[in-house]
Amino acid sequence: MWTYIGDRWQQILYNALQHANLVFQAVIVATLIAIVLAIVVVSVPKLEPVANAVSAIGLTIPSFALVGLLIPLTQIGTTTAFICVAFYAVLPVLRNAVVGLAQVDATLLESARGMGLGRMSSMLRIQLPLAWPVIHAGIRTSLQMSMGIAAIAAYVLGPGLGTYIFTGLAQVGGANAVHSALVGTIGIVIVALLADLILLAVGRLTISKGIRS
């Protein structure tokens, strides 16, 4: 095992960075989309059950099925992998963003309007900061889930550590099959843990001490 890693450590490190890069980019885009959608949903309360249903149903779609649906449209490659990861990344953030924004005390919003703040100003200066801890928790969930989805996206030649897993499965019985699969699996776990530590640090920096749990 150590010989396998020693002979390939530079490529493994490169693939780990590519894996993290794919996931972070997808989660950032997904977070922006989810927050915009959540703002719309909170502004139109009748849409909340629809948003919750979409989040629940979306998470039940097998990732391989989604990849299969995307291939005719976006072909095999990084684009398909990115769209697949971003699709799943939106769902936990959207659910948490809707919950977080909806839980902001209406009295605070009324006071803000009394002070002359418009709807958008209230959203940016009051609702989003107060909902941020819940949204942040959704982003952490999304990031961890996306690490696994990105591995599956390697099936369509997406970048990352999933390549080692599929290589190991394709070479079952070969000398390095188990080593390859283990490198991919353990590597993803390590990258996921490091990414979560980064998000925890971001949370410490961006969540006010007064509302930090």
Image (cartoon, rainbow, N blue to C red):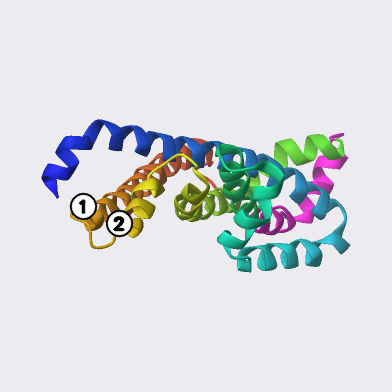
Q: Position of residue 212 (x, y in %)?
A: 50, 49
User: Mark 2 belongs to which amino acid?
Assistant: Gln
Farthest left residue in view: 3
Q: Taking 156 as reference, is 113 left or right?
A: right
Q: Looking at the image, which residue is at 85% across and 51% down?
A: 43
Q: Looking at the image, which residue is at 69% across and 48% down?
A: 72
Which element type, helix, strand or loop, lies under badge 2? loop
Predominant SS of the magenta segment? helix
Q: Looking at the image, which residue is at 82% across and 37% down?
A: 120
Residue 114: name its quadrant: top right
Q: Position of residue 147 (x, y in %)?
A: 45, 50
Badge 2 vs badge 1, beta-carbon distance below 8 Å: yes
**What is the number of the mark on residue 66?**
none
Residue at numbered disc 2: 171
Query: Is residue 127 shown to the viewer in this render?
Result: no
Residue at numbered disc 1: 176
Q: Position of residue 130 (x, y in %)?
A: 64, 47
Q: Looking at the image, which residue is at 61% across and 38% down?
A: 79
Which element type, helix, strand or loop, lies under badge 1? loop
Q: Taking 117 as reference, is 195 left or right?
A: left
Residue 69: name its quadrant: bottom right
User: Mark 1 belongs to which amino acid?
Assistant: Asn
Q: Position of residue 117 (x, y in %)?
A: 84, 35
* Residue interval drawn in magenta: 95-117
- Say which label, 2 or 1, has the lower sequence index: 2
Neighbor class of circle 2 (other Cα within 10 Å; few <14, some 14-19, many 20+) is some
